[in-house]
Image (spheres, rainbow, N blue to C red):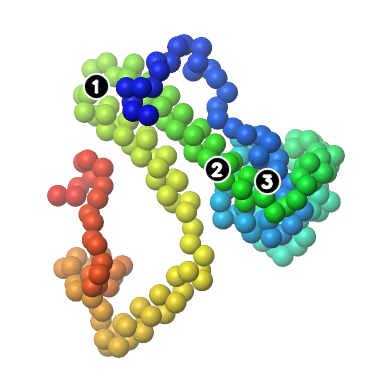
Amino acid sequence: MSLAEVPPLAGPSLERTPPQDVAAEQSVLGGMLLSKDAIADVVEVVRGTDFYKPAHETIYETILDLYGRGEPADAVTVAGRLTTSGELARVGGAPYLHTLVSSVPTAANAGYYARIVRERAILRRLVEAGTRIVQMGYAADGTEVDDVVDQAQAAVYEVTERRASEDYIPLSGILQGTVDEIDAIQAHGGGFSGVPTGLVDLDKLTHGWHPGQLIVVAARPGFGKS
């Protein structure tokens, strides 16, 4: 859909409930409480701030805390940890944790539901960015239009940048390449294995340009590419 095809917003529509899927959030948490494999699947997709309900974010972070310590993360242990932190009542109590578990027939689909949660979170951030852009437009009296446009672009860019920064690569996927790069550096006497750019700090990060690479210098307007 192009921008021209987007229907105009009436006043009351700005008060609509933000994009969310509470059932998907519950399914994610229920799966995590059932299986540590589900925890491993989910943690690669969503972050605590992706949950619409604050209670769900608290439960999620508690599960991850237990999981990170190598302890069981089930309804009983999570309730115990939340009791210790004084947050159990705020998330709905122990019965709610057991409800999350009983509402999920299998933990195998936790990763699928996690992707739904993440997509809704991205849409919420986009709505928030759009709201800020609307406010910028109305409050732009006396402000240079180009400055307002730059601010609007930055608001949208923040959404896409956050999405990209949350894409993690498993260690196993980069380890061999890193080892090969270290070997190549040693073979060159500790110097750069590629063609130096002349920019010392950049060369330290990239070890020069290498055959087969496509080098693109990209950034939003006004970020100093020239």
| Secondary structure state at the residue bearing disc 2 | helix
Q: Where 70 falls versus 104 (above or below)?
A: below
Of 19 and 71, nearer the camera is 19
Mark seen at residue 118: 2
Q: Where 105 falls versus 120 (above or below)?
A: below
| Res. 134 image quadrant | top left
Of 2 and 49, nearer the camera is 2
Q: Position of residue 152 (x, y in %)?
A: 32, 30
- Please give the name of the residue rendered at 66% of the width and 39% of the height, measured from the top-left corner: 24
Q: Position of residue 44 (x, y in %)?
A: 56, 55
> Does the CB distance between marks 3 and 1 fall below 8 Å?
no
Q: Position of residue 204 (x, y in %)?
A: 28, 70
Kind of residue at badge 1: Thr
- CA neighbours of label 3 inside 10 A, class few (<14), some (14 to 19), many (20+): many
Q: CA distance from mark 2 to mark 1?
A: 35 Å
The answer to which of marks 2 and 1 sits earlier in the sequence is 2
| Secondary structure state at the residue bearing disc 1 | loop
User: Does the rendering let one see residue 77?
Assistant: yes
In which quadrant is the N terminus drawn?
Answer: top left
Disc 3: which residue: 28
| Res. 153 image quadrant | top left
Kind of residue at badge 3: Val
The answer to which of marks 3 and 1 sits earlier in the sequence is 3
User: Does the rendering let one see residue 203?
Assistant: no
| Secondary structure state at the residue bearing disc 3 | helix
Report the residue that reaches farthest toward the top.
11
Kind of residue at badge 2: Arg
Disc 1: which residue: 143
Q: Where 225 falls versus 182 (above or below)?
A: above
- Please give the name of the residue rendered at 51% of the width and 71% of the height, measured from the top-left corner: 172
Give the side of residue 137 with respect to residue 167, left or right.
left
